[in-house]
Amino acid sequence: MQIQLLVTGKTTDSRIAALIDEYRERLRHYIPFEFAVIPDLKNAKALSEEQIKLAEGEAILSRLTPAMDVILLDEHGREFRSIEYADWLQKKMNAGRDLTLVIGGAYGFSPAVYQRANGKISLSQMTFSHQMIRIMAIEQIYRAMTILRGEPYHHE
């Protein structure tokens, strides 16, 4: 099983990019992990919000296979405490399917992406930039791995 974090657009803040790299390195010791980036749309300023969502949606769908368990990071998704998330992730790993967590662009997901998804999770009821949510998502995957191994990273 592999976990993939699929994101729309490059990480523009070098500090966030450095943290992503740090947690990617940490995750290597636990599970095969891929951080995949869908390039920014060309001429996005000339497109409407709906056109952007549709174009990003097509790009997301082109990166998915039928065998993947696709979970959207979405404000209307299920919320977890970190220990609950670790348990949820363990069940996903036990199922043996590759897991792809998807972070959309600024305008969310197209209807086709919602239709393809196997579920939605939310990291908070608050709204965060899609840049910030990247590090939060990858850190929570790392935290879950340490919880599952009984390591002292998580304190509760």
Image (spheres, rainbow, N blue to C red):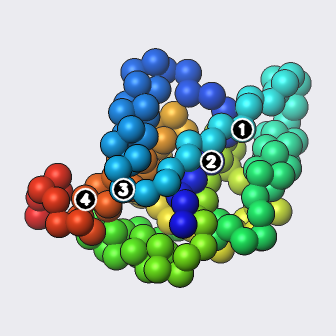
Q: What residue type is labelled 1?
A: Ile
How far separated are the C-alphas under marks 1 and 4?
29 Å
Residue pictured at 74% horizontal, 31% vertical: 39
- The N terminus, quarter of image: bottom right
Rendering coords of residue 45 (x, y %) = 81, 23
Are there few (<14), some (14-19), or many (20+) residues within 10 Å of tag 3?
A: few
Q: Which of marks 3 and 2 is in front?
A: 3
Label 3 sits on residue: 30
Closest to the observer: 53 or 90?
90
Q: Earlier in the sequence, mark 4 or mark 2?
A: 2
Question: Mark 1 and mark 2 in contact (Cβ < 8 Å)?
Answer: yes
Q: What residue type is labelled 2?
A: Leu
Residue pictured at 16% horizontal, 59% vertical: 151
Label 1 sits on residue: 38
Q: Earlier in the sequence, mark 1 or mark 4?
A: 1
The answer to whether residue 16 is visible is no
Are there few (<14), some (14-19), or many (20+) residues within 10 Å of tag 2?
A: many
Q: Nearer the viewer, mark 4 or mark 2?
A: 4
Q: What residue type is labelled 4?
A: Thr
Label 2 sits on residue: 6
How far separated are the C-alphas under marks 4 and 2?
22 Å
Local secondary structure at mark 4: helix
Rendering coords of residue 82 (x, y %) = 29, 64
Local secondary structure at mark 3: loop
Closest to the observer: 142 or 9?
142
Marking on residue 146: 4
